[in-house]
Image (spheres, helix red, strand yellow):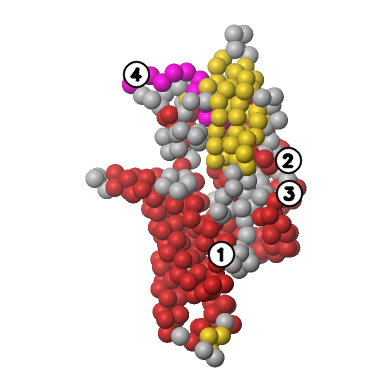
Amino acid sequence: MKRTVFNEEHEAFRAVIRDFVAGEVVPHFADWEEAGLPPRELFRRLGALGVTGFGIPEEYGGPGDPGYKYQAVLSEECAYAGVMLGHYVLNTGIVLPYLLNLADEEQKKRWLPGIATGDIMLCIAMTEPGTGSDLAGIRTTATPSEDGTHYILNGSKTFITGARNSELCVVVARTSPASADSRRAGLSLLVVPTDSEGFAFGRKLQKIGLRSSDTSELSFTDVKVPVENLLGEEGRGFEYLGQNLARERLAIGAEAIARARAAITFTKDYVRERQVFDRPVAHFQNTKFVLAECDTDVAAAEALCDRALDLEEAGELTAADAARVKLCGTEVAGRVIDKCLQLHGGYGYILEYPIARMYADTRINRIYGGTSEVMKSIIAKDMGL
């Protein structure tokens, strides 16, 4: 089905990214997976392309806001090549908007130019060992110092993506106790340099997928954070965290759909080459029917996602619509990639084949950014249920 969501400028950008991925990523990707993260220099090369600073105004060294569709194009091209750019999507699509929306003028001058060049990368620390989706249960504390010049940060976080390749970490911490009326009150966002004294990396967690992006435990022991690093207003952290969820969930859904599309392409190539009973697997009716079902499912999910991309660019994407894209996209990707792996037979379970990596990488999409069950609750509420 012909897509109309991207224009000529998007397609010209796609060609640039495709060349970059083919030359700078694909030849080295296996090494990055083995190391558990890409080299830090990757992000400076991406900065040179101008893509680490999407949304950063020109006065701070960025390209301005060309629209989210450019980030969607980049995610698609990585998916089609069977690779990923470490925690690039989290840095640019999820964490950077917090700084763009909440940072004051002094903070923007201090941080945004380095982000635009790729010299500063970002991560965010929300999840704690005992909280998971219950962010109101955060126990990490940031206590104001007696002289009022800094906060003293103590606590721990887990499942933190990209921290080892980041210079700044947006930490969600409790700056005051929860109120009797709301457990969500008293949370604040602090921008913490990862080389701060008392900021420590714990285990690098071993995941079944997304192995080219590091996921770590963090701990904070009497970390001094200047009050100038408070992002937004004190005590409004929970409110701020909800402001970018629609974009985050759209990004997860769009990436999942792109991977599903890539899985179909990889599988078509495989079944045309693979011989069984003296003929290609592609000649069997079952193969044709399975791939026809997969193609139709992905086309439907793409249509939903493309509509959401238009709404996002117009500033009209709702939380419920983003939840629909994430729920549909990630569930479709899970089904489609599973079927494509089955058509590979035993080779589908071998990591040298892209489908095996996709199978492992895609499973997390139904969990992070809000589980499928959370998405269903949001959609049901929007339906008045």
Question: What is the CA distance from the residue labelled 3 to the residue labelled 1?
Answer: 24 Å
The answer to whether mark 3 and mark 4 are in CB contact below 8 A is no
To which quarter of the image does residue 290 belong? bottom left
Q: Amino acid at mark 2?
A: Asp
- Residue situated in front as seen by the camera: 238 or 197: 197
On the image, the x and y values in percent for residue 4 come to 49, 65
Find the magenta span and give its range: 170-181
Identified at 61% across, 64% down, the residue is 351
Mark 3 neighbour density, 10 Å: few (under 14) some (14–19) many (20 or more): some
Where is mark 4, residue-wise?
Answer: 180
Question: What is the CA distance from the residue labelled 4 to the residue labelled 1?
Answer: 49 Å
Residue 123 in view: no
Label total for image: 4
Please give the label number shown on residue 119: 2
Question: What is the CA distance from the residue labelled 2 to the residue labelled 3?
Answer: 13 Å
Mark 2 neighbour density, 10 Å: few (under 14) some (14–19) many (20 or more): some
- Mark 2 or mark 3, whichever is nearer to me: 3
Q: Amino acid at mark 3?
A: Pro
Local SS, label 1: helix
Mark 1 neighbour density, 10 Å: few (under 14) some (14–19) many (20 or more): many
Identified at 70% across, 51% down, the residue is 35
Where is mark 3, residue-wise?
Answer: 39
Where is mark 1, residue-wise?
Answer: 356
Identified at 53% across, 58% down, the residue is 360
Q: Amino acid at mark 1?
A: Ala
Local SS, label 4: loop
Identified at 46% across, 33% down, the residue is 130
Q: Quadrant of the C terminus?
A: top left
